[in-house]
């Protein structure tokens, strides 16, 4: 599903954002482009998970398991963080429109984006260091069989449970609280504004859909971190709780790129531009082919 829906929709969205950024680079565009890149990295590393699920006789090379987990879990949290900063930008634009317009700069958004990648990357490197430690019987992510990230010993759980809790608090529950506050504030401002009713409904739909996706996609897996820490064991339903997070990769474009009226206009412009380019190419080919055919009898007589 992610490969079929997520890959083309994110590539299209990234191309649209690139075209818009060439005309005018805004903070929101920077966050959206980073969100697209995060989703694309997540999708491109999914074949490694498929390889592991095939249960081949030969085990997966040892370096692929930590690499996959670093990219897979890292991009889940980067997506959550970029959804959060988008919500903050919309809240500031709705509640403090004048001050936000004066102070917002693309360079600030670039620094925020870099900070998010560094924050999530540092957590990912911490997990990577833990999973490759040799102080315990086996690596954390290798487990006791050929599957990645499963069948942990109690020594592994003792190391991993506090780290999982910290991940969920810093990279999910805190961003969720910020996102909820921002979108609730946006909805309150929009309801009391003098905007056209259609624009109000569209903006409210985007806010509500974002919150729902945030909770449904990232919530179950991070709740399993909290439960695992409380019970101090590996939760049996953790792999099932991880499944909804994969849906985020193709739901993000549906929410931000296709529910937004600005994005609808951009997609239409890009589509017309592509049609114009291809029509021009086909016209040149047709003219060249017709010219060659018209010259053919002359050359044969000669």
Image (cartoon, helix red, strand yellow):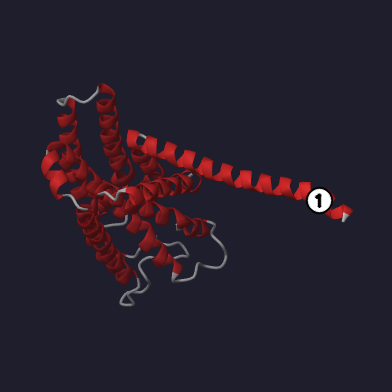
Q: Position of residue 294 (x, y in %)?
A: 77, 46
**Residue 49 locus on image (x, y percent):** 47, 57
Question: Quick check: 137 above or below 45?
Answer: below
Q: Residue at x 28, y 45 (%)?
A: 219
Q: Position of residue 60 (x, y in %)?
A: 50, 67
Q: Residue 198: name its quadrant.
A: top left
- Out of 23 and 31, give the one closest to the viewer: 23
Task: Name the outermost residue toward the top.
Answer: 197
Q: Is residue 288 left or right of residue 50?
A: right
Please tell me in which quadrant of the rendered image residue 184 appears.
Answer: top left
Crowd around label 1: few <14 · some 14–19 · many ≥20 (10 Å): few
Res. 283 visible in picture: yes
The image shows residue 80 at horizontal and vertical percentages of 28, 49
Q: Quadrant of residue 203?
A: top left
At horizontal 39% and vertical 39% (from top left) the residue drawn is: 266
Q: Nearer the viewer, residue 209 or 244?
A: 209
Q: In the picture shown, does residue 118 fall above or below 213?
A: below
Query: Left or right of 226: which side holds 144?
Result: right
Q: Is residue 298 left or right of residue 258?
A: right
Q: Residue furthest bottom?
A: 134
Q: Count the marks.
A: 1
Residue drawn where x is 17% and y is 40% of the image: 93
- Toward the right, the furthest residue is 301
Residue ID for mark 1:
296
Vertical position of residue 117 compared to residue 35: above or below: below
Where's the C terminus, which quadrant?
bottom right
User: 112 left or right of 130?
Assistant: left
Taking the image as drawn, is residue 235 in sight?
no
Q: Say above or below: 262 vs 49.
A: above
Element class at badge 1: helix
């Amino acid at each position: 599903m992610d490969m079929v829906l997520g890959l083309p929709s994110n590539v299209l969205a990234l191309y649209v954002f690139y075209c818009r950024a060439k005309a005018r680079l805004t903070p929101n565009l920077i966050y959206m482009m980073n969100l697209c890149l995060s989703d694309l990295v997540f999708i491109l590393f999914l074949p490694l998970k498929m390889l592991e699920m095939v249960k081949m006789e030969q085990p997966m090379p040892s370096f692929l398991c930590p690499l996959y987990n670093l990219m897979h879990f890292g991009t889940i949290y980067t997506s959550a963080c970029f959804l959060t900063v988008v919500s903050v930008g919309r809240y500031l634009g709705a509640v403090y429109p004048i001050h936000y317009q004066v102070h917002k700069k693309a360079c600030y958004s670039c620094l925020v984006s870099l900070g998010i990648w560094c924050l999530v990357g540092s957590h990912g490197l911490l997990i990577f260091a833990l999973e490759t430690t040799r102080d315990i019987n086996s690596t954390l992510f290798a487990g006791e069989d050929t599957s990645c990230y499963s069948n942990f010993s109690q020594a592994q759980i003792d190391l991993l449970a506090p780290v999982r809790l910290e991940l969920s608090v810093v990279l999910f529950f805190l961003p969720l609280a910020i996102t909820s506050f921002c979108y609730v504030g946006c909805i309150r401002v929009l309801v009391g504004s003098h905007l056209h009713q259609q624009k109000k409904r569209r903006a409210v739909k985007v806010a509500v859909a974002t919150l729902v996706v945030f909770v449904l996609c990232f919530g179950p897996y991070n709740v399993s971190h909290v439960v695992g820490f409380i019970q101090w064991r590996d939760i049996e339903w953790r792999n099932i709780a991880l499944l909804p997070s994969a849906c985020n990769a193709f739901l993000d474009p549906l929410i931000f790129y296709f529910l937004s009226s600005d994005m609808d206009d951009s997609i239409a412009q890009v589509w017309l531009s592509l049609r114009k380019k291809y029509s021009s190419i086909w016209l040149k080919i047709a003219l060249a082919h017709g010219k060659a055919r018209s010259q053919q009898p002359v050359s044969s007589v000669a």
